[in-house]
Amino acid sequence: MTQASPDTLAWAQRLVQMDTRSDQSNLQLIECIADHLRSLNVPLRLSWDDSRQKANLFATLGTGKPDGLVLSGHTDTVPWDGQAWSADPLSGEVKNGRLYGRGSADMKGWIGLVVAHTRAWLEADLPHALHYAFSYDEEVGGFGVMNLIADLREAGIAPALCIVGEPTDMVPAIAHKGVHRWRCCVRGKAAHSSQTPMAVNAVEAAARVVAHIAGIGEDLRQNEPRQTGFDVPYSTSAVCRFEGGIADNVVPEECRFNYEFRDLPGSDAAAMQQRVVDYANTLEPAMQAVEASSGFTFESFASMPAFQARPDEAAVQLAQRLVGSRETTLVAFGTEAGLFQRAGMSTVVCGPGSIQQAHQADEYVSLEQLARAEAFLRGLAAPPR
């Protein structure tokens, strides 16, 4: 079985062993990579979140060369609470041809590959500049990469191409859905549960809106034009969190729930959200007849745009050349690709591992996939044919 080089595997293990869950700082990982790049005299810049507990890293190899290709990866991972892991999620254990650990597939294996290749790229005559873009908080809304892209814009840095190394089994992905999440807070009026006419039940009002969101999802399932290639070929809705009520005999005064739309490329997520707001507005007059301050408020807390690339785009053709195949795919999960695309870069998603292992107990990436990605990256030092 083909395996990744020892240095590549060591870097991937090192990164997996660092706890960078989205509710934790990622600075240990960022400084580890930054120290290595500084030792090789690679110029880099950091951009921070407001707390300065998280940072993006952007580095450039081949400064002054034309165009420029971004190799993108997010450093944060999802939690593992409640999952039945057979080993420590931060172990970075290698067995049976697999590297195990949280983030091994999504997407520290890719980042480790990129960092491990730095010295070889510096010694090669690169045909174009290479940029590393390692971000924070992708898993909770893409906030880090938004900050990173804004920092590049202010600095006048404008790479031409981007490869986002999310796990696609090394098949270039040319489209994915967007994901847009909202929080709805409902304000009612409390009362003893025997006095319901004098109350505004926030849970019941919320439930009506939840049912309406489900109805929008059903309408999309039945009527939205299909896009072949997606496993779910239409936009979807989902209510994923719901909280309300304090006791069995108290009409609840407050309620909160979170929901999302995952929109196909070209669909209008804002119009979907407007349907929710319009329906909530029809409920408020009856609520406010009992309590003037009652009603609904909506807050957007995550928005990652859909992504779609043309098969003839430069980034797609580059990825196809590097993998040695004309095959492409579409993926259901969201990535930072749409944000890089909106920043003016020809973008493709292609990386080692499978999304079927990401976010799961005993997450892993196979050593064969890492080896394939390593060959892919080696090809970046070769001039176009």
Image (cartoon, grey):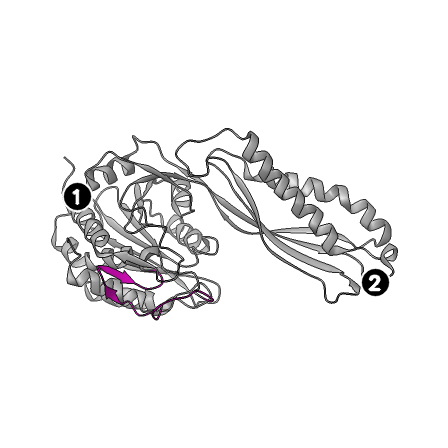
Q: Residues within 10 Å of mark 2 (few under 14, many from 20)?
A: some
- Residue 219 location, quadrant: top right
Q: Would you place residue 8 above or below residue 17 in this image?
A: above
Is residue 34 in view? no
287 vs 325, left or right, is right
Q: Would you place residue 61 above or below residue 308 in this image?
A: below
Residue shown at 79%/64% (left/top)? 250
Q: CA distance from mark 1 to mark 2?
A: 72 Å
286 vs 229, left or right, is right
N-term mark: 1 or 2: 1
| Type of amino acid under label 2 | Ala
Q: Position of residue 55 (x, y in %)?
A: 39, 62
Q: Is residue 101 magenta?
A: yes
Number of numbered discs overlaid on the protein picture:
2
Q: Position of residue 333 (x, y in %)?
A: 42, 46
Location of the C terminus (image quadrant): top left
Is residue 318 in view? yes
Q: For the magenta stretch, what is the residue range?
A: 81-103
Question: Disc 2 designates what residue?
Answer: 191
| Type of amino acid under label 1 | Pro
